[in-house]
Image (cartoon, rainbow, N blue to C red):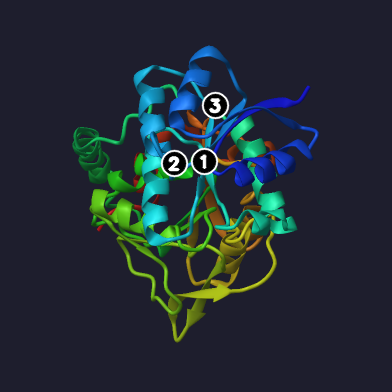
Amino acid sequence: MSKKILLVDDSALMRTVLSDIVNSDSRFQVVDKAKDGVEALELLKKNTYDAVILDVNMPRMDGITLLKEINKNKIRAKVMMCSTDTKEGAKVTLDSLELGALDFIHKPDRASDCRGDDFTKTLTRTLAAVCESRAPVSAKAFSIDEIKASRKMVDIVAKHADKVTGNRIVAIASSTGGPRALQAVIPKLPKNLKTPVVLVQHMPEGFTASLAERLDSLSEVHVKEAAEGDVLQAGTVYVAKGGKHMHVITSAGKHTIHYVDGPTREGVRPCANFMYESLMDSDYDSICCVVLTGMGADGTEGIKNLKSKKKVHVIGQDEASCTVYGMPKAVATAGLVNQVVTLDDVAQEIIMNVGVK
């Protein structure tokens, strides 16, 4: 049976084009349309949908305001945002994810540009992930009080983690639900973490810089969008740039970031498999691999290949705390996971594994 979709967009032409794309896939059917948040809210109060495709900029009530109303009215809706690729669009997208939207796509400015294969594949793949996601129970933003409380926990854990030896690195993979999940992990890491952290979050170009800035503003560790040639430093988190595959290479005895263009792998770019495989030839003694919420199986093949050459410790997020139990399930099913932990415990397990200075 087709998944029931509510489509919200102020452009009549865009509503028609997006409906055609969604309805061309037998998995989905657009059963209702709304031209703004006011109409959409009335529909959401009366009906249940498997997913909502939500425009950001609309008259009367925009997408962000609608998300706030959904939360206020305690409506359990699985929302996918349509966003532009401007810096402001990236900020709005991150705001929407914090308010409970599960994923987003970059929508071309012109409806005619939506009919291409790339956009159609991205739309239907993302919509499938949202339909399979767990509806958010609450959409409260990660609070400063939570961060402070978690840092007390970190202090206790860190006392037992200063004896960890060896040259190590943390490598994190996340996808659907990842931006919110990362806010429950990265801000808990202490600035004296003994290792660098490399991170692949499935996002298009133009969005990963804003994600890095937001995580940096919440964290003791430094978080940045990784730049070509960056030399990896302890206590810094390097977020892979959207639209390119990030590799860690050894150059003049130092581990540096190198980007590679190329086709998608596992349907995504950046792909965590490439990041993990690039560490096979590194000088690191041990790699702490962390696989968080996400659709699909990115990370599994890369970790499997990495394990053939390196000592690897794999932490997988548990099903109950995942938005989509796809990527963590894949590594667990492959028998690659050393620990399965709830999202709240991921940071302390990273610290225990790699240590503090």
Q: Which residue is mark 1?
A: 10
Q: Are marks 1 and 2 in contact (CB under 8 Å)?
A: yes
Tell me which numbered mark, 3 or 1, is placed earlier along the sequence: 1
Which residue corresponds to mark 2? 58
Q: Nearer the viewer, residue 356 or 119?
A: 119
Q: Secondary structure at mark 2?
A: loop
> Callout 1: few (<14), some (14-19), or many (20+) C-alpha neighbours within 10 Å?
some
Which numbered disc, 3 or 2, marks the residue that appears first in the sequence? Answer: 2
How far, Cα to Cα, is label 1 from label 2?
A: 6 Å
Bin the neighbour count of mark 2 within 10 Å (Cα to Cα): few under 14, some 14-19, many 20 and up.
some
3D distance between C-alphas at marks 3 and 1: 27 Å
Please tell me whether mark 3 or mark 1 is closer to you in this view.
Answer: 1
The tag earlier along the polypeptide, 1 or 2, is: 1
Question: Does residue 46 appear anywhere in the picture?
Answer: yes
Q: Position of residue 23 (x, y in %)?
A: 75, 36
Towards the viewer: 85 or 12: 12
Q: Of the residues shown, which amino acid type is indicated by label 2?
A: Met
Q: Residue at x 57, y 15 (%)?
A: 47
| x and y, in percent, of residue 104 in the image | 53, 45
Residue occupied by mark 3: 134
Q: Secondary structure at mark 1?
A: loop
> Which secondary structure, mark 3?
loop
Residue 316 visible in the displayed image: no
Residue type indicated by callout 1: Asp
Left or right relative to 263: residue 190: left
Q: Nearer the viewer, residue 248 or 54?
A: 54
Q: Residue at x 55, y 44 (%)?
A: 11
